[in-house]
């Protein structure tokens, strides 16, 4: 039985996040430059977006470029930005046809203007779509986001527009760039690395983590579905005991 056939429709995670890792290592294995890995990673992005749409995931966040990625060689950063523009332009039609809404998180003001423009165009074209929401994390890091949210909270408090006693988990959460999305239920990382790497630290608090040994360019829809099945077979306790959970669900 395929992994897709094992998925229980009523237990599909609402929000899945992916650290697409291993493009460079995969390219080296092929005896090619790192950029070749990124180019081939685009097909995996396509598969995961399609797969997520097919099973009814509502939000899919992809870690496409971290605040730390600027430290990579200039030619690789440029290649990634160009690839982003090309991919977005090429996929706009298909996103619209498939009812996919495209959004981003991160400080996109620091991206080259051509990348910003492509992103804005795609966001505008898909704004009314009601199916899967794909969120590209671009020039994003969770520490950046939490720091930024804290500065906003401090500013409002200083102006007397927010009382310190009004600051709780929910109010703080509303200042994060992910305020409009639910917390992540499943986080997938490819390439065998088992780290969070400054990705969605707040939103991952109760996420199930799934690590796949395949490099990102090898990751296919069936691998995505396998991670969903693995998620569905885990017992999510949210700090409760297994016994308490049984009583609650029984
Ligand atoms: C990690 O592999 C991958 C990235 C930093 C970039 C991901 C980009 C893509 C898949 C291409 C385009 C994406 C979109 C959304 C259009 P790595 O370079 O860190 O690999 P390594 O760990 O083997 O060096």
Image (tube, grey):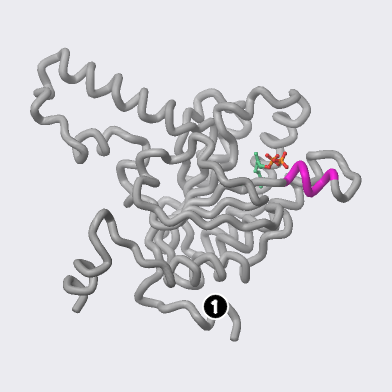
Q: Residue 63, percent across and down?
A: 55, 43
Q: Residue 3, percent across and down?
A: 57, 77
User: In the displayed structure, does residue 96 sit left or right of residue 174?
Assistant: right
Q: Is residue 76 visible?
A: yes
Image height check: is 242 above or below 144? Answer: below
Residue lying at 28% horizontally and 56% vertically, measured from the top left: 238
Residue lying at 21% horizontally and 38% vertically, measured from the top left: 169
Give 215 or 44, whichever is nearer the viewer.
215
Residue count near mark 1 (Cα–Cα under 10 Å), binned few <14, some 14–19, many ≥20: some
Give 197 or 150, whichever is nearer the viewer.
197
Q: Residue 9, percent across and down?
A: 40, 77
User: In the displayed structure, does residue 183 sit left or right of residue 159?
Assistant: right
Quadrant, the C terminus: bottom left
- To which residue does mark 1 refer? 4
Query: Within 8 Å of ligand 1, the CB of disc 1?
Result: no
Residue lying at 52% horizontally and 59% vertically, measured from the top left: 96
Secondary-structure class at tag 1: helix
Q: Residues in magenta?
A: 23-28
């Amino acid at each position: 039985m395929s992994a897709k056939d094992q998925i229980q429709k009523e237990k599909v995670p609402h929000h899945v996040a992916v650290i697409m890792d291993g493009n460079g290592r995969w390219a080296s294995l092929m005896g090619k430059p790192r950029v070749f890995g990124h180019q081939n990673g685009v097909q995996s992005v396509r598969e995961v977006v399609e797969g997520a749409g097919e099973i009814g995931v509502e939000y899919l966040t992809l870690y496409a470029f971290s605040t730390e990625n600027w430290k990579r060689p200039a030619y690789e950063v440029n290649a990634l930005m160009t690839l982003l523009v090309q991919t977005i332009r090429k996929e706009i039609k298909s996103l619209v046809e498939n009812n996919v809404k495209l959004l981003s998180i991160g400080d996109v003001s620091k991206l080259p203007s051509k990348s910003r423009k492509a992103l804005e165009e795609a966001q505008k074209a898909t704004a009314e779509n009601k199916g899967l929401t794909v969120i590209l994390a671009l020039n994003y890091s969770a520490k950046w986001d939490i720091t930024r949210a804290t500065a906003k909270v401090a500013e409002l408090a200083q102006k007397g527009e927010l009382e310190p006693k009004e600051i709780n988990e929910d109010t703080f959460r509303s200042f994060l760039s992910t305020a409009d999305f639910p917390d992540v239920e499943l986080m997938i990382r490819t390439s065998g690395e088992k780290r969070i790497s400054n990705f969605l630290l707040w939103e991952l608090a109760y996420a199930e983590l799934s690590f796949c040994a395949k490099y990102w360019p090898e990751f296919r829809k069936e691998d995505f579905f396998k991670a969903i099945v693995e998620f569905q077979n885990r017992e999510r306790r949210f700090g409760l005991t297994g016994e308490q959970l049984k009583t609650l669900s029984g």
